[in-house]
Amino acid sequence: MGFLQNILGLGPKADYKDLMTKGALIVDVRSKGEFQGGHIRGSINIPLDQLRNELAKLPKKDRTIITCCASGMRSASAKTVLESNGYADVHNGGGWSSLQNKLKV
């Protein structure tokens, strides 16, 4: 169960605001249309179905990355994709609006 909780972003709570002050990048993996309808300022949009082909758009593999989407499911998949491609510090931020609220606290 712990593995499933970590995949879905329900594991140990990350301090997303602290991660951002330390230079984390938010990668929003929703579709371009969803992203245009609202997103976290400063985030970049790489739809999940394009992520494997767009890894070159991401910074060095040691930079902290926070993934987000609409509900947390696609961002969990994105976290797995990034980790399997050598990104060392990836956090599933879950739904973008919820993550945005966590960043304001």
Image (cartoon, rainbow, N blue to C red):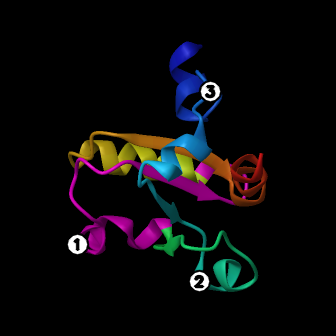
Local crowd size for mark 3, using a 10 Å CA cut-off: few (<14), some (14–19), many (≥20) = few
Q: What residue type is labelled 2?
A: Lys
Which circle's residue, 2 or 3, is located before the other in the chain? 3
Residue at the spot of label 1 = 56
Q: Residue at x 29, y 75 (%)?
A: 57
Q: Can you say which quadrant of the picture contains the N terminus?
A: top right
Relative to 19, does residue 48 appear above or below in the rendering? Answer: below
Q: Residue at x 23, y 47 (%)?
A: 62
Distance Cα–Cα, label 2 vs label 3: 28 Å
Q: What stretch is highlighted in magenta?
A: 48-73
Secondary element under disc 2, as helix, strand or loop, is helix
Query: In the figure, is residue 36 to the left or right of 52?
Result: right
Q: Which amino acid does label 3 sit on?
A: Lys
Q: Does 3 appear in magenta? A: no
- Between 43 and 51, the one lying in front of the other is 43
- Between 101 and 4, the one lying in front of the other is 101
Relative to 48, does residue 90 appear above or below in the rendering? Answer: above
Secondary element under disc 1, as helix, strand or loop, is helix
Residue at the spot of label 3 = 13
Residue 35: image location, x then y, percent: 65, 78
Residue at the spot of label 2 = 32
Q: Residue at x 79, y 52 (%)?
A: 101
Q: Which amino acid does label 1 sit on?
A: Ala
Distance Cα–Cα, label 1 vs label 3: 29 Å
Mark whose residue sits in front, 1 or 3: 3
